[in-house]
Image: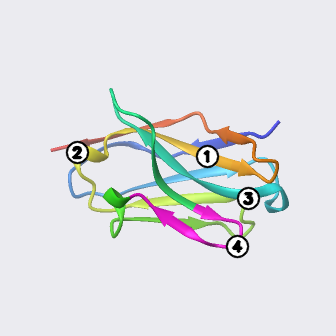
Amino acid sequence: QVRLVQSGGGLVQAGESLKLSCAASISISGIASMGWYRQAPGKERELVASVSRDGNINYGDSVKGRFTISRGNAKNTVFLQMNSLKPDDTGVYYCNLRSYSNTIYWGQGTQVTVSS
């Protein structure tokens, strides 16, 4: 069973920054991609950013230029640096991992709240 352990998040004011971390319990050899999704109240879960095993990165349109996804040295940890936060960025952020067997795993979720 794959475990994803998230850390970070919290309450900030608009324009400030936060950093999220997610560590997977498996090595990079079993990971096809890792990333972050978020879900705001009353809305569907949406992609924030993802990185594939070979380093290809995708961002959701609303975060391009403000958020940066990166990996740790062992590549089974991902970080999300969130700058210039806006109230619309408020939501629960979930770490996501897709294995090479196409199984999807989710972290426990962490609340990010941006006040105006």
- Mark 2 = which residue? 87
Report the Cα–Cα distance between label 3 and label 4: 9 Å
Residue under pointer 3 = 32
Mark 4: amino acid: Asp
Amino acid type, residue under disc 3 in the picture? Ala
How many neighbours does mark 2 have within 10 angstroms: few (below 14), some (14-19), or many (20 or more)? some
Report how far apart the C-alphas of labels 1 and 4 lie in the structure.
16 Å
Residue at far left of view: 116
Q: Earlier in the sequence, mark 1 or mark 4?
A: 4
Labelled pair 1, 2 in contact (Cβ < 8 Å): no
Work out how far the residue at label 3 is from the one at label 1, CA to CA, in angstroms: 11 Å
Quick one: label 3 or label 4, which is nearer the N terminus? 3
Please give the residue where the numbered disc 1 appears in the rendered image.
96
* Label whose residue precedes the other's in the sequence (3 or 1): 3
User: In the displayed structure, does residue 3 sit left or right of residue 63?
Assistant: right
The Cα atoms of the two marked residues, 2 and 4, are separated by: 33 Å
Q: Position of residue 37 (x, y in %)?
A: 49, 46
Stretch of the chain drawn in magenta: 51-60
First in sequence: mark 1 vs mark 2: 2
